[in-house]
Amino acid sequence: QKKMLENPQPDMMHYLQLMQLNYLSFFHVNWRQLQMGGESLQAAMQNLDLFFSLAKLKFACEFYNRKNILSEFSEIHFLNDLKVYREDLGDDLPRLHFLYARLLKLMQDGELEVYQEVKASFVQHLGELSAVDRLNILGYLINYVISRTRQNDPNYTKENFVLYQIGVANDILLAKGHISDTQYLNIVIVASLGKEWEWLDSFQKKYEQYLLPSDRDDVVYFVKAYIAFSHKKFSEVIGGLRNVENISKPSIALRFKGLQLRAYYEEHGRNDLVY
């Protein structure tokens, strides 16, 4: 328990485990509850509250994330009670609880000031967050920005690139030593749209090695074609994509086909487009 209390990156399961330890300590068969102090019982209840509060906030953020991206939603209970609980904690509110609470507020109300607050606090306190929470929170921020840009909100035009910069600079996007092909390609597309060529070149040199070996060749080939497209080298894109064979992953194959159609259109015009 002493070792756990010194953990600089307490996450949701940290509080659950502390609750379990104190529960087992207090209710041990050799422990005379009424004749001893109640420190373990109090600690068990405190950590249970912290676990429940944080778990509810994390699940609520996931519900709202799905609502913004997939238009799915379900009623969420106890949010008002948890707000009162956080207010009672005051300055003792753990950083992770604060971040998820403000992130939930952002997803509910969509205020630019709250977005800036969450982003700034996230960057400032990265060292206090576990790798999983860093990836989750950054992912929620990215998805939120995507939902705002789809609504043509001018305040978020460059924010996707800013968030990816944060993710790359702090190695947040790596999961078990790898970056997903989807995440890699999204970064390439966002950087290309912003014409951040120097940064993109640096990203590729650093992160290409972290792609799964089974995806790497197809992803790298597509990236070259996409950058050529961004530079209006449409014939190069068409010629290059014709040579791509045995694309096994549907998500990459779909991107290839879409880029090829766009290149045909740009090169030959609507009337000569070959399907």
Image (cartoon, rainbow, N blue to C red):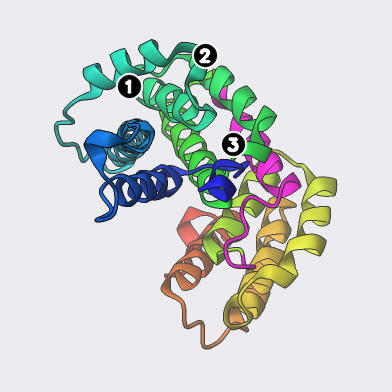
Crowd band around label 1 with a 10 angstrom C-alpha radius: few (<14), some (14–19), many (20+): few
Q: Earlier in the sequence, mark 1 or mark 3?
A: 1
Residue type at mark 1 is Gln
Where is mark 2, residue-wise? 91
User: Is the residue under label 3 in contact with that under label 1 (CB below 8 Å)?
Assistant: no
User: Which span is picked out in magenta?
Assistant: 156-178
Q: Could you say whether the residue bearing mark 3 is in a helix, strand or loop?
A: helix
User: Is the residue under label 2 in contact with that under label 1 (CB below 8 Å)?
Assistant: no
Q: Is residue 274 above or below residue 113?
A: below
Q: Could you say whether the residue bearing mark 2 is in a helix, strand or loop?
A: helix
Where is mark 3, residue-wise? 160
Q: Is residue 89 above or below residue 172?
A: above
Crowd band around label 3 with a 10 angstrom C-alpha radius: few (<14), some (14–19), many (20+): many
The percent coordinates of residue 34 (x first, y second) are 22, 35
Q: Earlier in the sequence, mark 1 or mark 2?
A: 2
Residue at coordinates 35% horizontally, 32% vertically from top-left? 37
Side of 183 where 107 appears, left or right: left
Crowd band around label 2 with a 10 angstrom C-alpha radius: few (<14), some (14–19), many (20+): few
Residue at coordinates 71% horizontally, 49% vertically from top-left? 168
Q: Residue furthest front?
A: 35
Alpha carbon separation for disc pair 1 and 2: 24 Å
Where is mark 1, residue-wise? 108
Q: Earlier in the sequence, mark 3 or mark 2?
A: 2
Residue type at mark 2 is Asp
Residue 236 appearing in the image: no
Residue at coordinates 68% horizontally, 71% vertically from top-left? 220
